[in-house]
Image: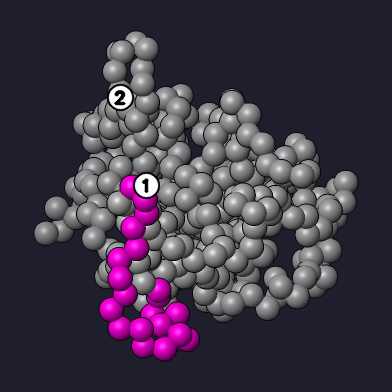
Amino acid sequence: MDQMTFKHDTVLSDVHMHRPNTHHLMTRLNSAGQPVFRSRFRFLVESRADSDSGTDSANDEKHESPRRDGGTSPEQDEEGGNQGNVETCLDEDGDLDVTHRPRKSSVDEGGRDLVCPIILQQSAPDLEQDENSDDDGGGDDEETCCSQDIIQIEHTMATPLEDVGKQVWRGALLLADFILSEKGTFSGATVLELGAGTGLTSIVMATTAKTVYCTDVGEDLLRLCHRNVFLNQHMTKPAGGEVKVKRLNWLQHSLCTDADLEFSWTEEEVADLYDNTNFIIAADVCYDDDLTDGLFRTLYRLCSSFNHSCTVFISLEKRMNFSLRHMDICCEAYNHFKHCLSQLQDMEDGRCRFKVEPVPLNFAQFLLYERIEQLELWKISASPRESEGTQSDSE
């Protein structure tokens, strides 16, 4: 593979597009023949009060802005001595002529850098065998000696719409920021993530929660998620958190307990899920109306089956598209999501009460990404009506 090419019917996450200084290292091909890349997301040393300064400190490469007077950078001034005031350089048309710093590396003179995936390791035909060998301690030194402030995520890029869960999206990074800023809230909790994708948010949650059920559908996606959980044990094990990758289909009414299938639930895990789940989280999963309906049906089915209160956090990004039906720019997927939120809050069946409210995005930013205004975080508080009646009687 000499260079990356994207087809017209593929979707590429902005997280990958807006990280130009990050080297996406191709590690293998998955069972679907898709290239799998590994990216590193570094936790910012300090929560970013100033987004500009945080961005500069987090990037491995620092870029100097050209000076308006046409002079050299401070480092160049030190090398060449104190040059004092430098005359303004103008070209033949009278425009300011700025001398740019030479690029560190280039393919040819005046050409752009050629971005090519680098294959670190060609996977065996059976990926499951490779994962089992890694679990036995045969992993790379890079994996076992990873820094505590770096999370490694394997993912694909430019996938068809049905495989977007194999990419990293901004909603997952936003939800991870919220978890890191509210560690006390999630400490020691049992958490269920719906539509976990690459597992990034579940891994971050496991740095403070006790048990995280990381769920999605699709063998290839679940194996990718399981691989990422293994790659980041250096973060979850010291914290005492455990991530369990499980199969959960929003379009089915029961959990898969078939022991012959991979990522199925045991009876003990099902009991733990219904008895102890304190929080349910989901990140960037509302992009298709049918899936959004399935998500809210699953939320209602789970919360109404709990005999205790539960809090749901859903992060998403409003994506504007041109609609031929409306002949205008709109966000139909987001509008349907808001409609489902309203229906859930207005639901009255005597079993469960839901309260919906937006979460202000004024918490610290721990991961490097663009926290754009289209990002939102919603909180849904679910409580059984029977418990409310008992509490009012006791009062």
Above or below, comparing residue 301 to residue 59 in the picture: above
Q: From this viewpoint, is residue 306 visible?
A: no
Residue beneath disc 1: 315
Residue 114, x across and y down, in percent: 66, 50
Which residue is farthest front? 92
Report, in whole angstroms, how far the alpha carbon at label 1 lies from the one at label 2.
19 Å
Residue 6 got which mark? none
Residue 143, x across and y down, in percent: 70, 71
Q: Which callout, 1 or 2, points to the residue nearer the camera?
A: 2
Q: Nearer the viewer, residue 260 or 40?
A: 40
Which residue is farthest left? 395
Above or below, comparing residue 190 to residue 95 in the picture: below
Q: Tag 1, which secondary structure?
A: strand
Q: Nearer the viewer, residue 123 or 368?
A: 368
Mark 2 burial class by Cα count in 10 Å: few <14, some 14-19, many 20+: some
Residue 376, x across and y down, in percent: 30, 46
Which residue is farthest right? 125
Name which residue type carries label 1. Answer: Ser
Give the mark, 1 or 2, whose residue is nearer the N terminus.
1
Q: Quadrant of the image for the C terminus?
A: bottom left
Q: Nearer the viewer, residue 44 or 294?
A: 44
The span shown in magenta is 72-93
Residue 330 got which mark? 2
Is 205 placed left or right of 395 in the picture? right
Q: Tag count in the figure?
A: 2
Is 341 placed left or right of 168 in the picture? left
Q: Residue at x 77, y 66 (%)?
A: 135
Check if residue 340 falls in the magenta segment: no
Mark 1 burial class by Cα count in 10 Å: few <14, some 14-19, many 20+: many
* Chief secondary structure of the magenta portion: loop
Q: Residue at x 37, y 50 (%)?
A: 92
Residue 361, x across and y down, in percent: 26, 56
